[in-house]
Structure formats: C-alpha cells, structure tokens
Amino acid sequence: MKLYYDLASPYAYLAVARAADVLGEEPQLQPVLVGAIFGWRGRGSWALTDARYEGEAEVERRAARYGLPPVSWPRGWPVNSLGPMRAALWAHRQGRGPEFARAAFEREFARGEDISDVALLDEIARSVGLDGVREAIADPEVKRALKEATEAAWALGVQGVPTLEAGRRLYFGDDRLEEAAAAR
C-alpha cells in the first residue's frame, strides 16, 4: 500500500496520523506536490475559497473524533509546500520519510508552526536524525525526483491528497481508510 501525501494538506495529516492503526500495517508514504496536481486538474484547494471556514471546522471535528490533538492552524496557512515536500522526498530517500512526515505534520497542525521556514525544516530533520536539509531542498536531483513522483502519481490517477493506493484501487481522502481496510 502506498499513501500519497503533501505536508500542506490537513487531510493528509489526518490520514498519515492514523493509517497504520486503521489499515493494520504501515503504508509506504509517497511525497507528491499537490500544487502541481491542482494545476493539472484545473482547480485548487478549498482553503483558498469561501469554503475555507467550513473545511477547517471539518478537519477540526475529524481530528477530535480520531483522538488527535486539537488542530492549530499555522499563520498564513496554506503554506507553500515546495521546500517542505523536497525535504520530505529527501528524508524518504534517506530512510526516514515516515518519521520526518509525522514530525512535520505535528509541528504544522498540532503546534501551528510554518513548515515552509527552512530553519524549522532543518530542526525537524535533525529531530529524526537527519542533517543537510538545506542542501537537499536545493539539490537538482531532489527537485527532479519530486517532479517525477508527482507526475507518476498523476498518471496513476491521483487527483489530490491523501490518496491511498491499495491493490489496484485508489482511495481519495482520510475518511476512506476504513473502506480500504475493509476491501483488503
């Protein structure tokens, strides 16, 4: 199983936080750039529409229902996730992807911190045993790999995040994890 995510997505935060418990195993976390996916599908995030308040309230209700800490929205959210997602892909390649993703999501949505801040990304990376995030997010190979991962997800049919690939099916949304678990 593969779980496609972007650190800017609060729904991806909810999915990553509970996927292993719901699915009975840890899915492979796959970093993708949801902004590019939004561009390809021709529409963007609900966070940039009049539905923002309702969307935030729904995320907060789900977090409470799932037993997660109350959501603390970062100032200026949604953040530009390009740097954070390059860092996530780099952490994935270093074998620390899940730890990095969980730590970044916790800092962003449980503490309300701006993960687009490179100093914070560096701190998050160090907290999971990684050094060199500043260089990694500027590395042309990391940039290329994130672009390719996002293009491959789009080609597979990923229309947003979180999307769980289980078997030959795609399940879009944190609220579809139970359905995916039941279908296995």
Image (cartoon, rainbow, N blue to C red):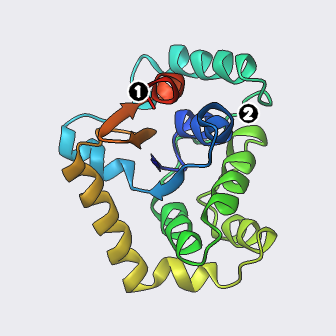
- Residue occupying image coordinates x 42% and y 78%: 142
- Residue occupying image coordinates x 52% and y 55%: 28
Location of residue 117 (image quadrant): bottom right
From this view, report whether residue 59 is shown above or below residue 6: above
- The residue pinned by badge 1 equals 46
Closest to the observer, 56 or 106: 106
Closest to the observer, 12 or 2: 2
Crowding around mark 1 (Cα neighbors within 10 Å: few <14, some 14 to 19, many 20+) is few
- Residue occupying image coordinates x 62% and y 45%: 25
From this view, report whether residue 166 is shown above or below residue 27: above
Q: Is residue 133 left or right of residue 149?
A: right
From this view, report whether residue 61 is shown above or below residue 18: above
Q: Is residue 133 left or right of residue 66?
A: left
The amino acid pointed to by label 2 is Ser
Work out whether mark 2 precedes mark 1 in sequence or the reverse, and give the earlier one: 1
Q: Residue 76's x, y, as percent?
A: 58, 42
Q: Quadrant of the C terminus?
A: top left
Closest to the observer, 100 or 124: 100
Q: Secondary structure at mark 2?
A: loop
Spatial CA span between label 2 and label 1: 18 Å
In this rendering, the count of numbered labels is 2
- Residue occupying image coordinates x 52% and y 46%: 8
**What residue occupies the far front of the structure in this picture?**
184
- The residue pinned by badge 2 equals 72
Closest to the observer, 181 or 92: 181
Q: Residue 26's x, y, as percent?
A: 61, 49
Q: Is residue 115 left or right of residue 34?
A: right
